[in-house]
């Protein structure tokens, strides 16, 4: 099996199902030589996962996926940061309040779902909430729905509760994406716009290219048109490219962890 790289993996430090050791065991089986956990709004995964990654011979890259917003165009933006100072003082200053907001919002969503008539076992929710104890929608769904994330019944229930006029609809107030980019750079990291095709983040790139180092090209939600558009922007601005599976275990779509390392050979050189 050819060696692989995956620079977009989630664990139970945010909205992934599996702990870091389980993900790393899977990565080893898949011949992954370089990996980055990019859990939402926390730099703590790298610190937890590093000893076991070293034991398995997997090069672990400090990573994070910051939940941000493009206020000019009124849409979410996910900002990836890599190879930053693991202490990450500037990143933590921005993201720790986000985690607090998310947790409080999730507790409020649980109250609204119960008022809607569905019992939520808070102890079951807490069991899957991971080391940080921050509750995500996936943890709530796991406690009230026996169906898998990919099952139509799960999708219907999720949309009924959390989308449109559902009882638990709505979101937290995110930070400006430019502030996320700046914080990563202040901590010595490399900035990447995550899956621009998935969230339609292309337009902001022309506004903020001076703060951006790379674009996530290889992602399960990207089409051939996305790949071509990202290639054009990479050539225009001199960005590097990243990629990964966006693995969430049973809390996400069924994907194979890892992509061919040859596709990211130049990017890997930046991290060695």
Image (cartoon, rainbow, N blue to C red):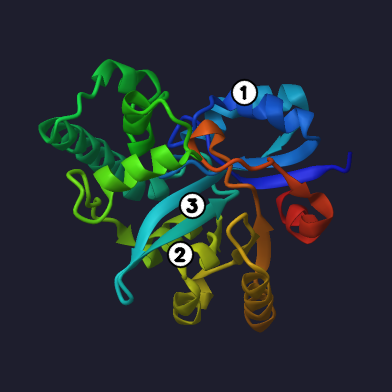
Q: Which residue is mark 2?
A: 199
Q: Quadrant of the N terminus?
A: top right
Disc 2 element: helix
Residue at left offset 65%, top offset 50%: 244
Q: Which mark is residue 260?
A: none
Q: x and y percent of residue 16 in the render?
A: 49, 34
78 w.r.t. 145: above or below: below
Q: Which residue is mark 3?
A: 187
Residue at left offset 42%, top offset 52%: 66
Mark 1 or mark 2: name the one nearer the start of the chain.
1
Q: x and y percent of residue 179 in the render?
A: 36, 62
Closer to the eye: label 3 or 1: 1
Give the CA distance from mark 3 to mark 2. 25 Å
262 lies left or right of 53: right
Dot 1: within a 10 Å radius of its alpha carbon, few (fewer than 14), some, or many (20 or more) residues? few
Residue sitting at the far front: 153
Q: Which mark is residue 22?
A: 1
Q: x and y percent of residue 151 in the render?
A: 48, 38
């Amino acid at each position: 099996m050819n060696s692989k790289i995956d620079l977009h993996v989630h664990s139970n430090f945010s909205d992934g199902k599996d702990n870091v050791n389980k993900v790393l065991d899977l990565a080893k089986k898949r011949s992954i030589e370089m990996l980055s956990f990019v859990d939402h709004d926390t730099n703590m995964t790298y610190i937890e996962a590093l000893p076991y990654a070293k034991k398995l011979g997997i090069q672990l890259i400090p990573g994070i996926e910051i939940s941000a917003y493009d206020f000019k165009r009124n849409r979410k933006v996910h900002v990836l940061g890599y190879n930053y100072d693991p202490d990450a003082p500037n990143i933590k200053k921005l993201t720790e309040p986000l985690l607090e907001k998310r947790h409080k919002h999730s507790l409020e969503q649980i109250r609204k779902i119960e008022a809607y008539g569905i019992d939520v076992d808070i102890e079951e929710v807490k069991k899957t909430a991971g080391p940080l104890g921050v509750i995500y929608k996936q943890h709530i769904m796991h406690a009230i729905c026996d169906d898998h994330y990919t099952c139509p019944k799960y999708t219907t229930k999720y949309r009924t509760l959390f989308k449109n006029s559902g009882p638990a609809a709505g979101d937290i107030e995110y930070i400006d994406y430019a502030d996320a980019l700046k914080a990563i750079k202040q901590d010595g990291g490399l900035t990447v716009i995550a899956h621009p095709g998935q969230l339609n983040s292309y337009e902001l790139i022309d506004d903020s290219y001076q703060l951006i180092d790379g674009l996530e090209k290889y992602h399960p939600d990207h089409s051939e048109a996305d790949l071509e558009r990202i290639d054009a922007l990479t050539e225009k601005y001199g960005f590097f490219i990243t990629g990964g599976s966006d693995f969430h275990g049973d809390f996400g779509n069924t994907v194979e962890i890892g992509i061919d390392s040859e596709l990211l050979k130049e990017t890997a050189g930046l991290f060695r």
